[in-house]
Amino acid sequence: MEPGKPYTHPYIPNSVPAVREAMLHAVGAASVEEFFADIPAALRMQAPLAIAAPHLSEARLKRHVDGLLRKNSHCAGQLSFLGGGCYQHHVPAVCDEINGRSEFATAYAGEPYDDHGRFQALFEYCSMMGALLEMDVVNVPVYDGMQAAATAVRMAGRHTGRRRVVVAGHVNPDKLSMMTTYGRADLDFVTAPFDPNTGLLDLATVTRLLDKDTAALYVDIPSFLGTIDDGAALAAAAHAVGALFVVGVDPVSLGVLAPPANYGADIVCGDIQPLGMHMNYGGGQGGFIASHDDPAIVMQYPSRLFGIVPTSVPGEYGFGDVAYSRTSFDKRENGNEFVGTAAALWGITAGVYFALMGPQGMTELAAGIAQRTAYASQRMTRVPGVRVTHADSCHFREFVVNFDGTGLPVAAINAALLQQGVFGGHDLSTAFPALGQSALYAFSEVHTQEDIDLLCATLEKVLNQ
């Protein structure tokens, strides 16, 4: 590239003068400035973006990108106790081997006749998830657990014909944002506060918020804070006013906790990321929705449902869509909701994980996590200035740690931990100010007793600096 000579940017097609002129001519604009004239000047950049000159060879570009990636500190290379919806688990090699196969790697769309293997793989996943949840119907995965929650309460709204949704105050703030954004045209959301001393919902307060206009009560069990509410009592309160009880659940927890169906849940939803998926910089998520085989509720699913039927050949079966007419694939804008790209590949991956683990493996996994959570809670109480906030409540995987006694903000503590090669807990001080300077610490089967002891020793070190 000669200095001072205009060039065509290799990654921006409309930087080619002829292309840019053709585009402007097609929309009837004399110039780029005229094209953007409707945007107020105060909202427009008045100078070019500070973008470096392009790398014009593949080798130079690769070196540049590799240099950027080396700046990242990721959980596989550090001791991490982050959680809050995306977790570090051991991913069996067979999960990556199978989801990387060419017949599955682009697991989207297709038809039962020409994509029979993928349809069967997803049917098997739905069957195993249904067995874990003790529910009859499970959807093909949607984008993530947050969308699943948003869709689940909209299903409740359509089913009941009501608008009001009561949401537990200790859900993930990002999930609540997704639910309110996704449902704002159909639903009105009310938040039920939780007791900051116990981390649990107050049944009397929840009951007062429920009324004849309530479509659903939504609760995560375990909660975002790791606490475990009385699901049966909450279900009874919701059903007393004719509302549906919608429960978000970590599927791994069901190795030791009763499935929500056992204590009255009408719709269950969650994220399948813990089931054989790596932490992928915001990806690697997939959402499930499940219910009993109640036709009135089943017809409210917007996403695909796969079933099994015998074929004309004795002993052979086919796998395909159930009640296809309720989807936007069939009804377009008149469907229950618009359905776009599914996380089908992660559904297949979760099916591989379930098949590998089996019921006993899921029980052992959950029990191991519960034991690590209990040990970590006891161990961290011995760190001077540190307090486990809801120590008297039951927890799974996560719990809140308060640092008010140290006189330091969580952000400073996490920065000091990172310098020691440790990712501290998720900072709650902004989203949950009533909890003070607190962080959410998460544990899984990848953490050893030595890891937890090292965390506590490192905390003592950084707090005494």
Image (cartoon, rainbow, N blue to C red):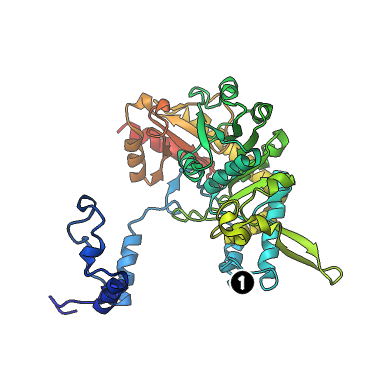
* Residue type for callout 1: Glu
2 left or right of 71 in image:
left
Residue nearest the observer in this picture, 159 or 420: 159
> Of all residues shown, which one is farthest toward the front?
28
Q: Quadrant of the rendered structure where residue 397 is? A: top right
Residue nearest the observer in this picture, 331 or 234: 331
Residue nearest the observer in this picture, 305 or 371: 305
The residue that appears at 37% across and 34% down in the rendered structure is 430
User: Is 385 located above or below residue 97 in the figure?
Assistant: above
Q: Is residue 435 visible?
A: yes
Where is residue 241 shown, x and y percent of the image?
Answer: 66, 27
Where is residue 205 shown, x and y percent of the image?
Answer: 56, 21
Q: Classify the position of the N terminus by image quarter.
A: bottom left
Where is residue 208 shown, x and y percent of the image?
Answer: 57, 21
Residue nearest the observer in this picture, 23 or 298: 23
> Of all residues shown, which one is farthest toward the top?
204
> Of all residues shown, which one is farthest toward the left?
4
Where is residue 395 shown, x and y percent of the image?
Answer: 57, 32
127 left or right of 191 in image:
right
Q: Classify the position of the C terminus by image quarter.
A: top left
User: Is 198 located above or below residue 345 in the figure?
Assistant: above
Q: Which residue is mark 1?
A: 103
Q: Quadrant of the rendered structure where residue 370 is? A: top right
User: Is 461 located above or below residue 269 in the figure?
Assistant: above
